[in-house]
């Protein structure tokens, strides 16, 4: 007997039972081995311009926070929350349409930009990202689908000489950090052109390599997460006063700030869309 009086409405559901195969090879590769490379679609002049903007902001950032201070906390090669440093170009990079299409297919439902940091692999010098890590560090679990994705925008070419990223394919599917023998046998160095995004499942073990050239190798690191993982830096607060549209505000997590009181929570529910 099929009952006709059962409740059928639902909420919090963004995917039903269906059969659908992705035609995007980057999405398929990310699901299978945890990393892929896509072209941002930027022109050569745009790629060069982004490099120039990165250099200017890097100089401003070091001046603002002090070289000695940054060196003392091992932060001299990082620009935290680069999109908050006064140049709208970096928000545009984070919201790149090609990248967005991949993220939206892998993180089903809502996601936010958790962090965007400028990273420099300095020439002939060890740096903070040269040790194996996950971009959700200290976590040893696996999930059936990504909770977070990392996207490295290559400001410069990533080559074997200048320390391009090493990955352990499919390591996002195992909880433990692999043995040294496994790393030696299975690590892959990812080579990519400037203007590319190297996308990683954030549970994939990876690291930067030694830069054996005379020039820095630069990237803009993005972390996209489900909204329930807190941001490294409060981007909505850091972007107060900026002219942002509704899509940009949602992307930056304006809808997911912690209410300071019960009254604020109840009031916020009136404006939320589910």
Image: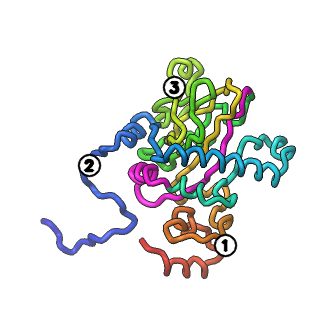
For label 1, the crowd category at 10 Å Cα-Cα, with few meaning under 14, some 14 to 19 and many 20 or more, is few
Q: Earlier in the sequence, mark 1 or mark 2?
A: 2
Would you say the residues marked 1 and 3 are in contact, meaning their CB atoms lie under 8 Å apart?
no
Q: Where's residue 183, x and y in %?
A: 56, 22
Residues at circles 1 and 2 in contact by the CB criterion of under 8 Å: no
Q: Is residue 131 above or below residue 55?
A: above
Along the viewing direction, whichever of 48 and 67 lies nearer the viewer: 48
Residue at the front extreme, as displayed: 45
Choose mark 1 or mark 2, whichever is in front. Answer: 1
**Front one among 228 and 149:** 149
Picture layout, residue 153 above or below residue 5: above
Q: Nearer the viewer, residue 175 or 109?
A: 109
Place of residue 31 in the rendered image (x, y in percent of width and height, measured from the top left) = 40, 40
Q: Which residue is mark 1?
A: 241
For label 1, the SS is: loop
Could you tell me how far apart the alpha carbons at marks 1 and 2 are, in whole angstroms? 42 Å
- Disc 3 designates what residue? 188
Q: Is residue 113 magenta?
A: yes
Q: Secondary structure at mark 2?
A: loop
Tell me how far mark 3 sits from mark 2, CA to CA: 30 Å
Please tell me whether mark 1 or mark 3 is closer to you in this view: 1
Q: Is residue 221 visible?
A: yes
| Chain part drawn in magenta | 96-124
- In the rendering, at what x and y percent does residue 110 appear? 46, 61
Q: Specify which label sits upstream in the sequence, 1 or 3.
A: 3
């Amino acid at each position: 007997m099929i009952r006709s009086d059962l409740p059928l409405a639902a909420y919090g559901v963004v995917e039903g039972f269906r059969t659908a195969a992705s035609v995007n090879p980057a999405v398929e590769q990310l699901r299978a081995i945890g990393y892929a490379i896509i072209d941002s679609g930027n022109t050569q002049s745009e790629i060069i311009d982004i490099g120039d903007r990165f250099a200017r902001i890097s100089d401003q950032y070091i001046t603002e926070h002090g070289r000695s201070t940054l060196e003392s906390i091992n932060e001299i090669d990082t620009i935290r929350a680069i999109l908050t440093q006064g140049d709208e170009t970096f928000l545009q990079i984070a919201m790149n349409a090609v990248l967005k299409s991949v993220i939206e297919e892998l993180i089903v439902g809502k996601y936010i930009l958790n962090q965007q940091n400028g990273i420099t692999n300095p020439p002939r010098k060890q740096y903070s990202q040269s040790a194996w890590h996950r971009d959700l560090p200290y976590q040893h679990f696996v999930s059936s689908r990504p909770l977070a994705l990392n996207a490295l925008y290559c400001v410069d070419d990533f080559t074997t000489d200048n320390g391009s990223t090493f990955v352990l394919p499919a390591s996002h599917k195992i909880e433990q950090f692999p043995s040294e023998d496994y790393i030696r046998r299975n690590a892959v160095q990812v080579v990519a052109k400037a203007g590319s995004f190297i996308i990683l499942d954030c549970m994939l073990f990876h690291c930067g390599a030694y830069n054996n050239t005379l020039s820095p190798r630069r990237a803009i690191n993005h972390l996209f997460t489900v909204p329930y993982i807190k941001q490294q830096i409060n981007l909505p607060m850091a972007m107060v006063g900026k002219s942002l549209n509704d899509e940009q505000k949602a992307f930056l997590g304006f809808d997911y700030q912690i209410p300071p009181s019960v009254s604020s929570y109840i009031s916020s529910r009136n404006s939320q869309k589910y």
